[in-house]
Amino acid sequence: MNSDQLDGISAIRTYVDRLVTGDGRCNGMKVLLLDGATTQILSCVSTQSEILSREVYLVSRLDDPRCNPNLKEHSNNNNNSINNENGGDSSNDNGGIHSLALQEEAHVGHMKAVVFLRPTDNNIGLLVRELSRPRFSEYHIYFSGILPPNLFQLLCENDPQDRVKQVQEFYADFLPINPDLVSLNCRNTLQMTSALYKRNILGLQSMLLANKRQPGTIRYQKSSRLAKQLAQDISANIKSDDIFHFRRGTGGGGGTNNNNNNNLLLLVVDRMDDPVTPLLSQWTYQAMVHELLGLNNNRVILRGVPNVSKDLEEVVLSSAPGHDAFFQSHRNSNFGELGEAIQKLLQDYQARSQQHQVSNLKSIEDMQSFMERYPELRSESHTVSKHVAIMGELARLVEVCSLMDVSAFEQDLACTDDQGGHLKELMSKLDSSSIKIPDKLRLGMLYALRYETAMQNAIPAVKEAMRRGGVPPNNIALIDAVLKYAGAKVRGPGLYGTNQSSLSKMTKSFMTSVQGVSNVYSQHSPLLMDTIESAVKGKLRGEDYPMVSKLGSGIGVDNLPLPQEILIFMVGGMTYEEATKVSDFNEANAGRVRVILGGSTVHNSTSFLEELKLI
């Protein structure tokens, strides 16, 4: 891999490698102090054992009274406000102790502390309190974003014992989920507050700085006021701060020549342009786990799943190099391919384990070889058991929820126009006892989105059928909520091919019929992919995606160089289906163009519907 390639995981790992040594100035045993957000960030790229093997004696939370004796007199209310300001998803914070963060166990006053925090008012307050009663001999402080001058001054004025040895900015203010997928893990951003908007601005800045990129062009989705504001504000920030000027519009990861034509395009889009993708069932490994089991901070909770042992109640699915080679290779595999791959994984493990049975140990050399390989075999056993358990639960849920039947109809609703046929089948499914309530809700919403503008859309009849089918009234109200948020009058063109010419639609339909659909459950292609294809061909319409120019916003997009790198930021959150398609695109276009997808959060249908309830 090109070391200069756009890659969220590599960017964060580089910072972590520097962090654990105090950037070369903090050798020997040390303590690592984190907050809720930075704990999550580090856990995406490093395991607890990896961190502790780098002369880190203890990993602790500066913002949790259970880890920090200086905070024990503080109330829980103060702690909650800290978690909220740090932008973490407190519902996934394990009561304040992440699996990477260990409890403090001993007197460590002789040790040095490496501190990694978000640059917030609350965190500076925590540092001031810490430095007034220092627990460590030295403090090497790193912030995950740009530290405002007033906070830096406050920190400098409150180090009475001169314990702080360095302060640096490491721009690791996002979660690197896959090499080409990064998230802020920021909920409730379909219509965000000013505080959440600020978090999104800072997170996007960090994505650019971590990858050492300054965009050559910034464009935004015209139908979204929020996307326009974000694009304009990030442009203004870049122009006003010299820190972004290390590389002007170029990047070495996209093509073979590192010249001024290697423009990075920053494209800001909004979830509201495509409300369909988050409502669809998923059939690739990573997306399917997130949809059916939940995948938060790379962790899957299997507690309560039938026949799952205690050591598998919480497991990790990480794309970081060296963590889980099977998941790295198969995170984008479809359900059928995955079943075959797990079967082969199990067979290969069984064959290797039989070679190392005690009955086969005939000599001292055999015993030594067994002991040398035992940790590897034990780790392999856990990996195999983990994937077998996940696959077993996915298969059970697919059968129990009749998901193949449901998904086939979802795909039809998303990809074809047949109002009469769709209405008949929808009514049948809403009346069926084998279709689960959440699936009835999603089907009703998909129908309403497609036929909202039809002369006789039958949406009132659909709502009544949903009520008879057991869908609660507050959930039926989500049909109106999704149309308010992303209906035909609000979203931009293109969701159902409305911005394509008749010739383009006929050509796409003809090619599909000639080539065939390889899998009836994967016909749908997110709107995002049409946008990417248009961008790389220089055909992204200025009327729909204006450019932020030096004089403000305009449509002057003619004669722009073709981008060789694209950073897409999706306000309101993206999905793993979109991430899978982006990954496939990058693989198919390696050496020509590279796309990295970022956004407020990663949605499944549950999280998307929960946020719609707030509108």
Image (cartoon, helix red, strand yellow):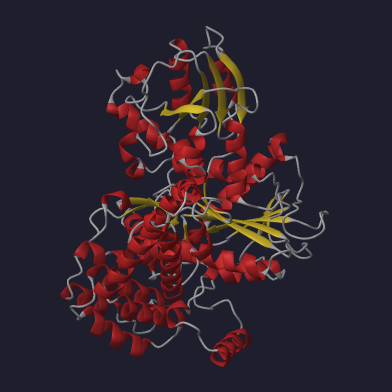
Q: Residue at x 37, y 77 (%)?
A: 410
Q: Point out the residue furthest to the top here.
A: 161
Residue 605 visible within the image: no
Total marks in image: 0
Q: Point out the residue furthest to the front here.
A: 363
- The answer to whether residue 33 is left or right of residue 556 is left
Q: Residue at x 71, y 46 (%)?
A: 214
Query: Which quarter of the figure is the N terminus placed in?
Result: bottom right
Residue 436 quadrant: bottom left
Q: From what the image shows, is residue 65 above or below residue 262?
A: above
User: Toward the viewer: 582 or 531?
Assistant: 582
- The answer to whether residue 544 is left or right of residue 294 is right
At which x and y percent is residue 407?
36, 77
User: Toward the viewer: 134 or 218?
Assistant: 134
Q: From what the image shows, is residue 545 above or below residue 129?
A: below
At which x and y percent is residue 521?
42, 79
Q: From what the image shows, is residue 548 above or below residue 562?
A: above
At which x and y percent is residue 130?
44, 16
Q: From what the image shows, is residue 75 above or below residue 609?
A: above
Residue 485 quadrant: bottom left
User: Toward the viewer: 215 or 314?
Assistant: 314
Residue 414 visible within the image: yes
At which x and y percent is residue 548?
67, 53
